[in-house]
Amino acid sequence: MADAAVEFLLLNLKQLLVYNADLILNVKEHVESLYNQFSMFKAFLKDSSEKRNDYEIVKELVRQIRAIVYKSEDLIDTFVAHTAFQRSRGPVARLIHGIDYSAKLRGLAREIQSIREKVDEIYRKQSFGLEALQLRETSGRGSPEKKAPVVEEENVVGFDEVAEEVIDGLNAGGKEEVEVVAVIGMGGLGKTTLARKIFTDPAIEFEFYIRAWVYVSQDYNRKEVFLGILSSLDMLADEMHRWSAEKLADELRVILQRGRYLVVLDDVWTKGAWDDLKMAFPKNNNKSRILLTSRNNEVAIHATDRNPYLLRFLNDDESWELLEKKVFRKEKCPPELKDLGRGIAKECGGLPLAIVVIAGLLMKKEKTCDWWEKVAKRVSSYVARDPKQCMDILALSYNYLPYHLKACFLYLGVFPEDYEIPVWKLIQLWVAEGFIQQVGEIRLEDTAEEQLEDLVDRNLLLVEKRRSDGGIKTCRIHDMLRNLCLREATEEQFLHDIKGSIEVPGLPFTPIINQYRRLCIHSRVLDYISSKPSDPHVRSFLCFPVEETELCREYTSFIHEAFKLLRVLDIGSVRLSLFPVKMKELVHLRYIALYGNFEVLPDSISDLWNLQTIIIETSSRNLKVKADIWRMLQLRHIHTNASCRLHGPPANVRKDGKDPLVRSNLQTISALSPESCTGDILARTPNLKKLGIRGKLAVLLEEKGGRNMFDNLTQLDHLVALKLLNDTFPNPPCGGTLPQLYKFPPNLKKLTLADTLVDWQHMSTLGMLPKLEVLKLKNNAFRGKCWQTQDGGFRRLRFLQIGKTDLVNWEASSHHFPRLQRLILKYCEKLQEVPSGLGDVSSLHVLELHHASRTAVASAKEIQKQKHELHQGLKLLVYPPEP
């Protein structure tokens, strides 16, 4: 999309001017001018973000801006790559190719001048476009007519349980004063249908004599909403159309004051809308209620103190029930169509809106097996192609997203259907793509996580799993919304989803790529690679094949040959036979994820000065890093499953005492070898937030001159997550100990141990860590038959997991774990019972037992009973379930 393209180009130009100006020395002034001109485009795109779909002139301007931005980006990136390659040549080669380089430099200057002239022309059109937009807004639009959402169905399926809960919530004792009850869910999920079912329920009609219903919508007008409520109450007089919003609100308060009322505000989009409208509802202290539906969780939280009711997707049986009712009305489906119908309903993904659209399609022709089989094969495409009844309603959620969220949402289309997206990967991809803008001193990753939560609150992203600290661990995008992503992304030339090869005998794999900046492929990866693709416009190439794919040696060079200006490369599911040696030519790379039997990260990686994230998954247990990370100023994250051995930086302290080799951007090293935990290395990575240490941990605790290497971790003031994985393969792990309390990083919140075989008496050390909130003791972390928890520890611990251990007796009470929320015991098969005193921990709400003894399960049930008697819920999960 043009917005993201301009954002990234500006970021790219800025970094080029600040860090690598020597690469464009002779055209620096031209590049600076481009930066200033494109900054004006950025402002225009931001101002027109919500309106461009309504005005063709704005849409055309956006297309022109995107085209000129892409051309500028290609031109400058190509020249920078050529300059970097020229400098990497030897003296003789540089001399031979010097004439060619000078010609390219002169050509670049001419091209930039041509672009600047084109930019001036577009900017004149831009001014005209804004004037036209403003003119039409003030003269013709007025208050758009409000229409009821398409999902207004007499056939209500799958809502009985939540409808009963909402009705009980409205009718229950509760507060005497007016209270808001909210129902939230994504577009098309049936919020209006549910609200209508509740509104017409006999119990509601009995309890609320004064009832009103009004559609609010995105482009609401306060006066129109008040007129709608009056009309619903059958109290609307002709002269009221001439009244002000304030006078209408006064009239409404008088009418509603007369008795117990229920007002349904359907489809409220913003907190501001609620603040605008609430003035009309009197606080009459007779248990009146307002039922509010919204796509946005923030609106619900803002409007009410109650927890909102979250509308779920239909299950397979409910989906079929709705489809059958819509197609056959009061009749039953013929037996020969039932299996096909169930398959069609399932393909709709539990979204009532999609089911209704497909039902309408099935009703247009005779109900034959041939016709239903055709529909069954193309359900998703039928749903995605219906512009008025389905996708446009879902598209509202996209069209009215804030400017900074649109690219983040569209990017979800790169992942396969039903793919469980790791949040850490998604966030680092967003950052590498340039979607996240710096806000003050806030980390880009923290800003990205806020934007992720925002998409979740808007019901555009589904939370699949949560981390032990409560954050989102993995997420999914609903298939319907993914279709929306792909549709909008195609329109914007944002990404291209390669479905597979063209099945024409004798013809190569030739997908139509055009000007797409991102390619993603999920099947027949080898067919695509073997076709020797080439496209200079592509900046991101991502593969997520369903099955692991082996890439033979002859094709390992395809990456740098096909996409010379690549910024993001994620082929983590394609096993490489050797590390691509010419990767160093891709100087624009910011993110790289590779999978293979790698034992060495080559020195050539050091030439990738833009690189932010390195992800290496290898079958080797050790990875020797020859790359000089101290030359890589932008590096933020190093992820690897192997023990990663780094070499220390050279001594290079300036006269002013400052160390130029401090890598303040580096935040993650997932598996550092114990030998690499030196003072030199850790002192130059002061902002590490996550550190994993894998290898023979005894090396960390070996005393030399009264000190050991673990002491170096005290320098990491920003470290919040630490993993200590004792890997002694091929030898079995032996018993160990823990360092003294003061040697741990001071702000540690999350600690994971595995195969350390520490005696339980040393748990008191961990208990005294002042900020520890999450403790994961994986297999063989501790050993011994008895753990007698000592007083004064674990004051902030919220999550405790204990893996395979020989523990038999555990003594603990509520004051040992005053804030514990979740306890997980895995393969603690010798443990006789869960300490009964934990039942007094008021915050404990989840207890999981995996492969536990019968007596331990019985004690957990007693704790659950104890909590129930105290009116404190406890979710008890036992795996495998008892017979």
Image (spheres, grey):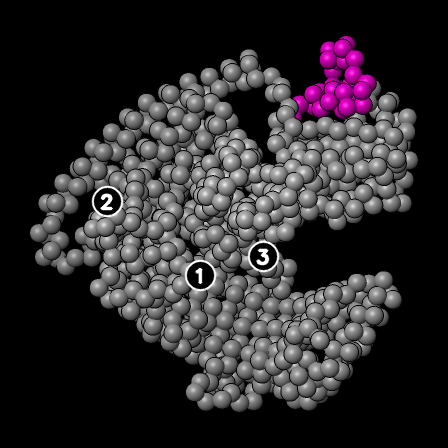
What element does badge 2 sit on?
A: helix
Discs 2/3, front: 3
* Label 3 CA crowd tier, 10 Å (few <14, some 14–19, many 20+): some
What element does badge 3 sit on?
A: strand
Left or right placement of residue 424 versus residue 802 in this view: left
Q: Distance between the residues labelled 1 and 3?
A: 24 Å
What element does badge 1 sit on?
A: strand
Q: Name the residue under label 2.
A: 79
From which residue to which does the magenta span run? 220-249
**Amino acid residing under circle 2:** Phe
Q: Which mark is residue 637?
A: 1
Q: Where, by quadrant of the figure, is residue 281 drawn?
A: top right
Tell me if I can see residue 160 in this picture: yes
783 or 851: nearer the eye?
Answer: 851
The x and y percentages for residue 431 are 45, 50
Left or right placement of residue 836 versus residue 18 in this view: right
The x and y percentages for residue 648 are 38, 72
Q: Distance between the residues labelled 1 and 2?
A: 28 Å
The residue that appears at 33% across and 56% down in the rendered structure is 524
Above-or-below relation of 883 to 627? below
Q: Residue 464 carries which label?
A: 3
The x and y percentages for residue 15 are 37, 46
